Image: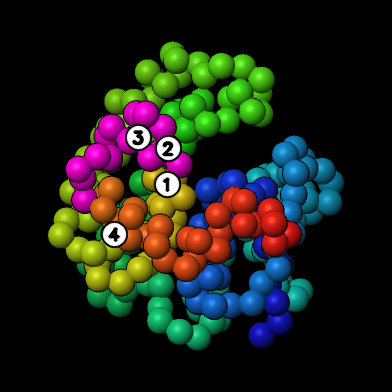
Amino acid sequence: MSDIVIYGVPGSPYLRSALLGLEEKRAPYRLAVMGMGEGRREEHLKRHPFGRIPAMEHNDFGLYETQAILRYVDAISPGPSLQPRGARAAARMDQIVGIVDWYVFPSITAGVCAERLMSQAFWGRPPDEANVTKALPSARVCIKELERLKGSAEFMAGDAVSIADLMLVPHIAFFRHTPEGSALLQGTSLDAWLTRMSARPSMQATERARLKQVA
């Protein structure tokens, strides 16, 4: 299989999710690092007309949307599947993936993490406390519901890593670095899950500093 090329900005949780899938499947790939703001350049808009990341090229096949990239990599690569076979486990995986896109990202990642971890470095301003306050009620619901859906299973959709884990973990890893996230996660099964996930080689290989160094 020829190497896959992934385009994105190190630090993006969605880029990291795609790379986690490649690492878990041990699929060869090359990361084409983009800078902040490069998503709107004409070259990238040909890969992703909505100007987002990540985008993927595999020979003459182009693909964007993280979920689609993960499912494609899973389908073409050998090794354990990233998608459970049972109907209920597969449905739970899809449900959690939807929660990540529709609720976790806007409340936890954009609402809390972006303000706490990015506002000063990228936008030259202190965190907007009003944005954090507004996002927290939904963030609390996200953590409570994700913990309920996970139940006593080792991973988010059962006893093996799935696309649900790979989509969720970059967001929760960021969240634990904020005061709000650390407080909400403390003592929960999600905190223990994040510790287990963080020990996986795929997580260590996709840390932001490591990606920038390799690139």
Residue where numbered disc 1 is placed? 173
Q: Secondary structure at mark 3?
A: helix
Marks 4 and 3, how far apart at CA? 18 Å
Q: Nearer the viewer, mark 2 or mark 3?
A: 2
Q: Secondary structure at mark 4?
A: loop
Of callouts 4 and 3, the N-terminal one = 4
Circles 1 and 4, Cβ within 8 Å, touching? The answer is: no
Marks 1 and 3, how far apart at CA? 9 Å
Residue where numbered disc 3 is placed? 181
In the displayed structure, would residue 175 be above or below residue 207?
above
The amino acid on which the numbered mark 1 sits, given as a three-letter code, is Ala
Circles 1 and 2, Cβ within 8 Å, touching? The answer is: yes
Of callouts 1 and 4, the N-terminal one = 4
Give the number of the disc on residue 156: 4
Rendering coords of residue 86 (x, y %): 25, 75
Q: Nearer the viewer, mark 1 or mark 4?
A: 1
Of callouts 1 and 3, the N-terminal one = 1
